[in-house]
Amino acid sequence: CDRLAQCRRGGGDGADILSHTGGLKCSGEGGEGFIPARRLKLAIAAHEKRLRRNFQGYTADAADVLIGFGASAIGRMPQGFVQNAPNIAGYTRAMAAGTFAIVKGIALDESDRVRAAIIERLMCDLEVKIDVATGRFASEIDALQKLASQGLLHIDNDHFIVTEAGRPFVR
């Protein structure tokens, strides 16, 4: 949209337009439309390769910690995931006692964190570079060959790119 491009050229991030309208009204050859602020922020983050993905969906939030509130809520920290008591009674008892309601957790090791980063970049940027020379993820890379043979992924040595045909399968 011309208004967004004009705002971007002016060095802004669109916040001046967003704060007053809750989004961006666009008009052009294809007609008029409105981009809600949340989607516009995600589009800008994607364009700038700052888009993130967590278990709640896509986000422009760069925080490494996501705290879950409420029964069954899931939280994420660099060390791993935690889940609160899944039933309201258990959650309420923990809160009344002044304790954490966490009932289980999954610790991540370095390999898990690297895999997560690769998956996040592939989902958010639709491409990722993996150092294939180390052989570190050889079996996973071999499994990706099937997607490439189906036209869903293009593999160029260490560069993995989701194709147009593959985009609908990225969630």
Image (spheres, grey):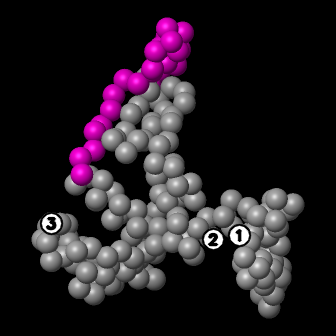
Residue with the mark numbered 2: 44
Extent of the magenta region: 86-110
Q: Which is more N-terminal, label 1 or label 2?
A: 1
* Mark 2 neighbour density, 10 Å: few (under 14) some (14–19) many (20 or more): some
Numbered disc in front, either 2 or 1: 1
- The kind of residue on which mark 2 rests is Ile
Q: How many marks?
A: 3
Residue with the mark numbered 1: 13
**In this rendering, is residue 124 above or below 8?**
above
Q: Are marks 2 and 1 in contact (CB under 8 Å)?
A: yes
Structural distance between the alpha carbons of marks 2 and 1:
8 Å
Where's residue 69, x and y in %?
Answer: 54, 30
- The kind of residue on which mark 1 rests is Asp
Q: Secondary structure at mark 2?
A: helix
Q: Which is more N-terminal, label 3 or label 1?
A: 1
Q: Secondary structure at mark 3?
A: loop
Where's residue 147, x and y in %?
Answer: 28, 76
Structural distance between the alpha carbons of marks 1 and 3:
39 Å
**In this rendering, is residue 160 above or below 51?**
below
Describe residue 169's horizontal placement relative to residue 80 as left or right.
right
User: Does residue 95 appear in the picture of this structure?
Assistant: yes
In magenta stretch: residue 65: no
| Residue lying at the far front of the rendered structure | 11
Residue with the mark numbered 3: 136
